[in-house]
Image (spheres, coloured by chain):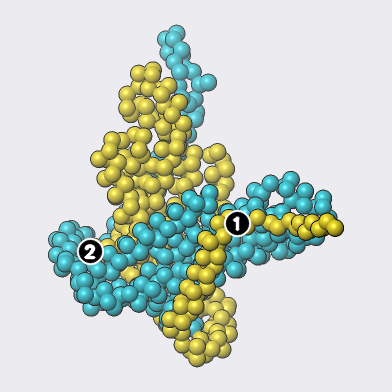
Amino acid sequence: MTKTPAIRRWKRPPFITNPTLRWGLWVGAAIYLAVAFGTMEIDWSRVFEGATRGQRFIASFFPPDFSSRWDSIQDGILESMWMTITSTVIGIILSVPVGLGAARNLSWRPVYLFCRGVLAVSRTFPEIILAIFFVKLFGFGPFAGFLALSVGTIGFYGKLLAEDIESMDPVPAEAIKSVGAGWLQWLNYSVQPQVMPRMIGLGIYRLDINFRESAVVGIVGGGGIGATLLTSFDRYEFDSAAAILLIIIAIVMALEYTSGYIREWVQ
Amino acid sequence: MPVIRQSGTKIWQRRSTKAQLAVWFGWLLGVAIFVYCWQLISEKTIWFFVMDAPAQAADMAERMVPPKWSYMEQLWGPVWDTINIATLGTLIAIVIAVPVAFCAARNTTPSRTLVRPVALFIIVSSRSINSLIWALMLVTLIGPGVLAGVIAIGLRSIGFCAKLLYEAIEEIDQSQVEAIVATGAARSQQLSFGIVPQILPAFAGISVFRWDINIRESTVLGLVGAGGIGLQLDASISTLTWTQVSLILIVILATVIVSEWVSARVRHAII
C-alpha cells in the first residue's frame, strides 16, 4: 500500500524570513511592553476623574471665543507669521553654503566633515530646546524664536540639499564643466537646475513646519501665538484656546494646500 | 529658445525678457516682504540684550562644564520614561492610523464622498497641532505624567503615519489585487492578500521613522508636565543648576543619535 501524500497547503511567506529573528522580535516586544506598563506610573484615579471632567472640558471649548481676546490673538498670530517667514528665509540662505559643503561630490573631505557636523548638531535638538537657550541668551521675544527656527531650518534644509546634490545626475555637470565654465557658473547651470524643483517644494514644506513650530516656541518665551495659547490654558479660558487652535489649523491647512499647488506648478 | 539680437549677432539667454522681468519682480516682492517682517521683529527685540549675548553665552558655557556626572543616577528613570512615551505613543498612533489610512486612500475607501473627507480631516488636524500643544491639553485633562505624554505623541503621530500610509496604499500595483479578485476572494481577503503584503515594507518603514521623530519630540514634553526627561530639564533650568543641564543635553543627544542609528538600520534592512 502506498502512502497518500500529505496535502500541501499554501502558506503566505512571512514578512521576516529568519524565524529566530521573527520570534525573537515578538518575544522581545512582549517583554518590553510588560516592563514598560509595569514601570509606568499612572494615577488611574486621576485619569478617571479627568474622564468625567473631560466632558465639561470639551464642552467649554465650544463655542470658540474669537472676540474677547482678539487683540492678543491677532498680535500672536502675526508675530508667528513674521517669525515663520524671516526664519525660513534666513535659514535657507544660511543652509545653502552648509548644504553645498556637506555634499560629498562637491567639497573636499575636511569641509565635508565640518558641514556634516554642523547639520547633525542643529538637527538633534528640538526647536523648543534651542528656543529655551536663545531666550536665556537674547531675552524674551520673537528674536529668540526666530533664531531657534532658523537653526532648525539649517539642519533640515541643509541635509536634504546635500542629499539631493549627492544623488544628482553627474552627466550635465560634466557637460557644463567641459565647455569651460567656472565654479560658480558650473553651480548655477548644472547643479542648481537639477535640485531646484525639489528644493522649492521643500522650502515651502519647511515654511509649513516653521509655522507649526512657531506656535509652540512661545510656550518657553520665544514669541508668537504660543504664549497667548499657554496663557489662555493657564487661565482656563478654553474657549479662547479653542479659537487659537482653530486659527492654527486653518492656517496650516491653507499653507498645505498652497504648498501642494506650488509644488505641482514647479514640477 | 529665448534669443535676443544684439547688433546682428544672436545671443542665447536662459529666459525671455518677459520671464526675466517676472522673476525680478518676484524677487523684489519677496525681499520686500522679508524686510517688512524683519523690521517688525526688530521692533519687538531689545537689542541691548542681543548685544550682550556673547558674554552671556560664555558665562553660561563656563557654568555648564564640567557636567555633573553623578546626576546620571537620577536620569535613568526619565530616559526610560522618554523612550516609553515615544514607543507606546507610536504604537497607539499606528493602531489608529491604519484604519484611517484605509479610509483615506482613494482605492480602498468605503465611500469617497462621506468617509474620505472625515479621514482626511482627522489626518490634517492631528498633523497641524504640535505634540506640545496636545500635551498641554491632556495635562489639564488627565493630569501631569507619562500617560498624557503617551497620548499626546499618539495623537500627533496619527496624521503623519496615516498620510504616508494612505499614499503608499494609493501607489500599490493594482494588477496584483485584480489577480486576487479573479480567484473569487472576498473584500477582506483582497485586503489581506492583495494590498497588505504590498504596503507592509512601507508600513514598517513609516513606523520606525515616526518612532525616531517621536524620541526627539518626547524629550521636550516634560516642559508642560507630560513626563520624560523634559521635566528634569525644566527643573534644572529653573534652579539654574547648569551642570545638570549640560548632562541632560548630552543624554538627549546620545538618545537621539542612538534612535536615529536604530531607525536607519531597520529601514535599511527593510528596503
Image position of B29 (left or right of A239) = left
Q: Amino acid at mark 2?
A: Leu
- List x then y, in percent, for residue A57: 53, 83
Question: Which badge, 2 or 1, comes first in the chain's sequence?
Answer: 1
- List x then y, in percent, for residue B167: 61, 53
**Residue A94 seen in render:** no
Which disc, if any, is residue A15?
1
Residue drawn at x 68%, y 62% as measured from the top left? B103
- List x then y, in percent, for residue A139: 25, 66
Q: CA distance from mark 2 to mark 1?
A: 51 Å
Badge 1 element = loop
Question: Badge 2 sits on which subunit?
Answer: A
Q: Considering depth in this image, is B213 or B43 the residue closer to the camera? A: B213
**Chain A in the picture: what colour?**
yellow
Question: Badge 1 sits on which subunit?
Answer: A
Query: Which chain can be seen in cyan?
Result: B
Residue drawn at x 30%, y 41% as measured from the top left? A112
**Residue that carries the numbered disc 2 in the rendered image:** A137
Q: Amino acid at mark 1?
A: Phe
Is the same chain shared between marks 2 and 1?
A: yes
Q: Considering depth in this image, is A155 or A17 the residue closer to the camera? A: A17
Badge 2 element = helix
Residue drawn at x 45%, y 69% as measured from the top left? B86
